[in-house]
Amino acid sequence: MKTLRGIAASRGVAIGPAFHFRRADLRFERHTVEDPAAEWARFEAALETAREQLADVYAKAEAESGAEQAAIFQAHALMLEDPELLDLVRTAIGEQGVNAESALSDAAEMYAQMLESLDDEYLRARAADVRDVATRVLRILLGVAESPTAGLTAPSIILARDLTPSDTVMLDKSLVLGFCTAEGGATSHTAILARGLGLPAVVGAGLDVLKIPDSAPLVLDGSDGKLLVQPDEEMVAGYRARQAAVATHLAQARQQAHEPAVTRDSHRVEVVANIGNVEGAQAALEAGAEGVGLLRTEFLYLERDHLPDEEEQYRAYRAIVDVFGERPVILRTLDIGGDKELPYLDLPHEMNPFLGLRAIRLCLARPELFRPQLRAALRAGAGRNLKVMFPMVAMVTEVRAARAVLEECRAELLAEGQPVAEEMEIGIMVEVPAAALMADHLAAEVDFFSIGTNDLSQYTLAADRTNAQVAPLATGFHPAVLRLVRDVIVAAHAQGKWVGLCGELAGEPLAIPILLGLGLDEFSMNPPAIPLAKQIIRALTLDEAREVAQAALDLRRPDAVRALVRERVPAANVG
Amino acid sequence: MPEITLTVHHKVGLHARPAALFVQTAKQFNCDVKVTHGEREANAKSILSVLALGVEQGAVITIHAEGQDADQALAELEALVESNFGEGE
């Protein structure tokens, strides 16, 4: 048996076989080649391999579903040897000396766009075929396997270097027992995804994760940050017993999940959900969410090759607010840049994307991104309880500029005779230390704050949360972060504004008593965490929570904060 | 340069299977084969260019061929289109 240690990223225990997710990374650099003839030969060899693959795929499809269904692969083969397409590639390689990957994707993209521009549904669908064929050849040129999830047929523990949003959409979640990644921190995408799914995860467990044989029996302990490889039977039996105990505890919490979160001395707080799509809305409601504290809108922008238009966004937002009826839904405007690059936006490469042109900065710089989203939000909010918040605000001027764009959009919509939200609450994410320190001035500009502790921690501690070497530093349990949270709440309350928190900290059992004691009004978390969070709040009085919070602020280290809560609040010491 | 003008009667026009058959037929010959539809001209051996012509049912196309086996190529393509791509009426 071997034990790998990493960061406890999502609570719970999983027992099952290993499955390695090997990413299909099709990114390439555009460059010129020294020997165009050799590059053309490399391209021709890749074409030949693609032709053989297509012949195999055709034969398989024909045997399984008949010639009619298989015809598409014949069309692919014809595209692969299209003389006009190949001429473009040959010219680009031979005369301009560009590499085969760039030459091919440029040529294919040209045809794809030409087909897309025609007013014919059938031909627009062929554009996808051209891209598909080009992707097949690109994979061969880049030496990337056909699909990273091929072979995932039984429930398994997913092992990977790290996982991105585009990777995880490919995973059939019903076959995922848990995640263990070599890299990443507690707020990396894998960790957030796992908590969203209520699955255990250990991240930043080191490169040894990648050496585990496929199908090796594993125990993943997401509460303690451990991965046991080939554990002995006694060990497995112990973990099975723990799995059962946790399940019982959770089942109890779930029975009261739809009751409000009221302390023993009748102080009520809101417990709401972080969601990222329409399906999440339903799951949140079932988990007992009293609304949505963070609607991430990035789902509309990922996994596609062009911007979503206003109408598509309107329909998606409307579908989500309709699920919640009268209950509040807070839509966060586009939060990209950083770790969420979108290829079709053609954002310049940045040395330091977390400190770069992202979120509200990007939206203010690119009105063509911002305006359709605001228009869609205003329309979706008509007659509903939709609020909007802007991410990554650092300056009062940014809030004013964003509000000005919003008001312009509202005026436009009214002039067009469209129904719009009449009174929409506007807030900001407080996730940049500058905003936390200037909270008194910012509070005058908005209706509410939502503290984003994931980013606030990494900016305050100057520790990249995606870098396993330093990610443990970026924890919201650090008293420095907790003090900022306190200051933000005090500043907002002084002006009669309410404060929510939508970072991972809001759903952490050990953090809940502290946040309650600091006066937080709204706790927004992944739906699976809601029942337990409500249970912890119900076990406390506001005075008890205040004492714990005060004691925590006086400590020096995050682990001391955790130990304090563990000792003082048994109800929070779970999983 | 020899050329013929035809009407495409197939219900999907010069798309899908008819387009594939058309291109495969043209490719059997050494001569250059061009097909025009309205203002647009395409290499008849290029499936992508033929598709991009957007030839629908009832459209009139002109096929030009140039080279040694041009006449034969035109005859075969004519037979293909006239036979409604082997699907009869």
Image: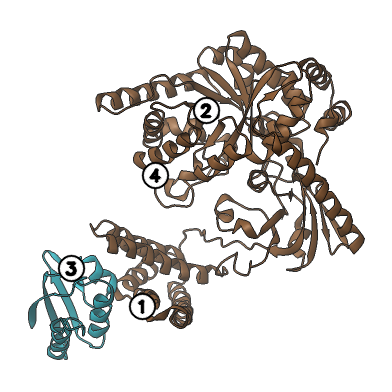
Q: Residues within 10 Å of mark 3 (few under 14, many from 20)?
A: many
Secondary structure of the residue carrying numbered label 3: loop
Residue at image mark 4: A308
Answer with mark 2 or mark 1, whichever residue precedes in sequence: 1
Residue at image mark 2: A327
At a point 18% along the width and 68% down the height, the residue shown is B55
For the residues beneath circles 1 and 4, the answer to whether they share a chain is yes
For the residues beneath circles 2 and 1, the answer to whether they share a chain is yes
- Residue A87 at what x, y percent from top left? 32, 72
Residue at image mark 3: B55
Q: Colour of chain B?
A: cyan
Q: Amino acid at mark 2?
A: Arg
Secondary structure of the residue carrying numbered label 1: helix
Q: Which of these two is toward me, A12 or A395?
A: A12
- Quadrant where the N terminus of chain A sits is bottom right
Q: Amino acid at mark 1?
A: Glu
Please identify the quarter of the rendering in which residue A513 is found.
top right
Residue at image mark 1: A68
Q: Colour of chain A?
A: brown
Disc 2 from disc 1: Cα separation: 50 Å
Q: Residues within 10 Å of mark 4 (few under 14, many from 20)?
A: some
- Quadrant where the C terminus of chain A sits is top right
Disc 3 from disc 4: Cα separation: 30 Å
Chain under disc 1: A
Circle on res. A297: none
